[in-house]
Image: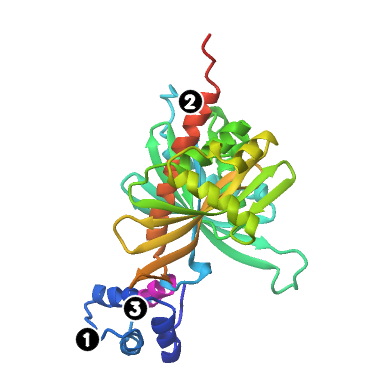
Amino acid sequence: MITSYPDKNSLKEVLTNKLTSSKVRYFCQENGILLPVNNKDCIGKTAHLFFWGLNDINELSELIFDEKNYKKAIRFNVSKPNGLADHLPVAEEIFNSVGVIRDNQSSFSAYRIKGVKITNEQNSEREVLLEYEHEYPGKVAMLNKVTKQIKIHVKPNDINSVEINALPEDNNDVKVVQLFLNDIAAKNEQISFRVKSVTLDNLVIDNKIALFDRFFAYEFEDWTLHQIKGLKVNKQNELIEVDEDGDDNEDILMGINSAVLQGSSLRTNPFVQQCLSRRYYFTQAHIKFYHRRNAQAIVLEVSFKGNPTLLEVRFIQILEIEDGKEHKSSLSSDEQKEILMGFHDILYNIYMELVRHQYQPADN
């Protein structure tokens, strides 16, 4: 968050070189300003002369096409068994536990919770703001403790389950969210809360491939899959990375893209067949999408990291198309969150279908 007004040269640099001209023009229009110029340099030179408010400056800082502004998303599902009529809905049980967790921080060890509060109450959806102090061992005394914040969005699915969404900045944030949810479950042992997430650990190897296979073949409402730009495959501690660099890698990706764009299963691809025969499976993909209606493209990373291997979806690139050319661009946090959670929905539904199918008894 920006706390002081930038000098005019910094503001001019941002509006001229760190944002697309259409983004600046739209931002001005949203504030009631119509720019009488078309040239990109002129747009920046004109827009920086206005005095913008604090909220405007912070919004502009979010829109700068810098990797630090590209978000990633994680999701958990917290549920309780059906039939516990004498207990509150899951969402209310979680919010009632917030004060208990705040007053008893021992389980967070290095991730000391300094503050927990409920914010942004909208209908049945709310946010929990976690402020924690993280220690970096080995750094000098003045730099080894950092205070951080992570927002957890709580969305009820029904009385027995809620969806927990967060946009972490790094693995420390992910660990704090996991610790928070584990404490929720521990404080409510009599309810037998279950904390679930999309994890490869619950899938047999064939279905680990099928998860990506079905996602690549999915008919997205707003996006068209254009290209698979990179893959990682894994077998325990062995790892293979396939990206656009190198002739062999380019041939492999070309074959996979051909299979995807033709609508056939990835299982017919020689590389995938080789993975299956060696008991390898996908753990990450970089995928380029084009928007069906807007002049926009994105590159997403769908990956499984950590132990257990949790699903993360993040932006690698956000692009705007002007005059047939792609330019680096950006989206607000709310826009990124909406897109990332939409992809999470799709992956979660595919995952749950695979889990249900693999545990069904075979027909005799």
Sequence-wise, which precedes: disc 3 or disc 1? 3
Q: What secondary structure is found at the residue carrying circle 1?
A: loop
Regarding residue 112, the answer to whether it shows in the image is: no
Q: Please name the residue shown 37% across and 43% down the image.
A: 219
Can you tell which of label 1 and label 2 is closer to the viewer?
A: 1
356 above or below 283?
above
Q: Main secondary structure of the magenta part?
A: helix
Sequence-wise, which precedes: disc 1 or disc 2? 1
Mark 3 neighbour density, 10 Å: few (under 14) some (14–19) many (20 or more): many
Q: Which residue is label 3 attached to?
A: 21
60 above or below 105?
below
Mark 3 → mark 2, Cα distance in angstroms: 53 Å
Residue 220, percent from left and from top: 37, 46
The quadrant where residue 161 appears:
top left
Q: Which residues are magenta?
A: 55-62
Q: Which residue is label 2 attached to?
A: 81
Mark 1 → mark 2, Cα distance in angstroms: 61 Å
Viewer-proximal residue among 50 and 183: 50
Residue 108, percent from left and from top: 65, 50
Q: Which residue is label 1 attached to?
A: 36
Please state which amino acid type lies under the numbered disc 1: Pro
Residue 145, percent from left and from top: 67, 67
- Left/right placement of residue 127 relative to residue 133 reads left
Please state which amino acid type lies under the numbered disc 3: Ser
Whether label 1 touches label 2, CB < 8 Å? no
Residue 52, percent from left and from top: 33, 82
Q: Please name the residue shown 63% across and 59% down the image.
A: 247
Whether label 3 touches label 2, CB < 8 Å? no
